[in-house]
Amino acid sequence: MPPGARATRAMTSARARRGEKSKTDGFFTRHRSVFLYVPNLIGYGRLLACALAMARAFTDVNAFTMLYALSFACDAIDGACARAFEQSSTFGAALDMITDRVATTALLTTLACADERFRLSAIALIALDVSSHWMHDRAMTTLGKASHKDVGGTRYGWITRYYYESRLFMGACCVGAEVMYVSLHVLAIDPTERTRTWVWVISGGTATFARLARLAAPLWAVKQWTNVAQLVSACRILAASDAVET
């Protein structure tokens, strides 16, 4: 091979190596630092925003609603980033589910503290939410599914399959449940002059939050129905797996 050809080939190989390294190690592509994936960083931010929201739950309606809304909105953003940057990961999926459960549990606990009439209901809803998702995740692992949302070809009922296969339906149910809990919390606390911020004034006060709670109630009910159906189906799948092994 002529010297010029060898030099050209070497330069081409060097460029290829540099390009491969850039594609592999770029911050907005898949790289070795899974903890620093963009969607995972957003997940950490969700937890922080949720914690700050709970810290202001009884002192500042404005901060509470805005911070919790930010935490909830980031749930959609991290998924979009994971797909856009090809940064989906097992750790990220687990972090996303844990963050969802922590946020809902914190919100229901705060609601129970605001009004003791919600105490037993909050405990029951937390138990249903955590157990249904935990058992569902175990069932999907048993079936060899890479994602807990991949319910195709399983023994899950139609409501659970539709819930996970339709992003719009899932999103509507989740938004409805969270709006329901936030509205009930705002209605449960006694807004003092300190908490009557611009959000409270512009929204129309308790009347608006009461309407929001009523509008969100059907979606909240469907979400709980889905949780029950998911729990029952997951238990059956796990039991069937045990029966086969014996």
Image (cartoon, rainbow, N blue to C red):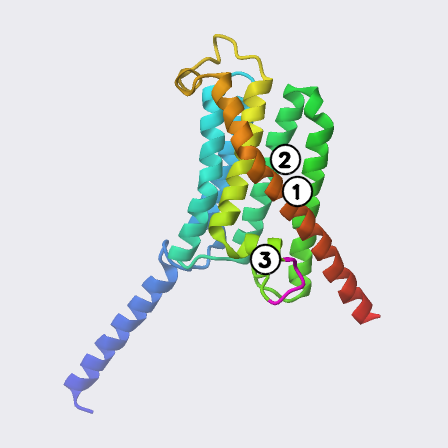
User: Is label 1 in contact with label 2 (beta carbons under 8 Å)?
Assistant: yes
Q: Which residue is mark 1?
A: 129
Give the quadrant of residue 54.
top right
In this view, 170 is above or below 203: below
Q: Disc number at residue 2?
A: none
User: Is label 2 in contact with label 3 (beta carbons under 8 Å)?
Assistant: no
Q: Secondary structure at mark 3?
A: helix
Residue 137 image position (x, y, % from top left) = 65, 55
Q: Residue sitting at 48 percent across and 26 percent down?
A: 65
* Mark 3 crowdedness (10 Å alpha carbons): few <14, some 14-19, many ≥20: some
Q: Which residue is mark 3?
A: 161
* Mark 2 crowdedness (10 Å alpha carbons): few <14, some 14-19, many ≥20: some
Q: Disc number at residue 105?
A: 2
Three-letter amino acid code at disc 1?
A: Asp
Q: Main secondary structure of the magenta part?
A: loop
Left/right placement of residue 243 relative to residue 187 reads: right
- Earlier along the polypeptide chain: callout 1 or callout 2? 2
In this view, 12 is above or below 86: below
Q: Secondary structure at mark 2?
A: helix
Q: Is residue 61 visible?
A: yes
Q: Which residues are magenta?
A: 153-157
Q: Secondary structure at mark 1?
A: helix
- Earlier along the polypeptide chain: callout 1 or callout 3? 1
Instruction: Find the residue positioned furthest to the left.
Output: 4
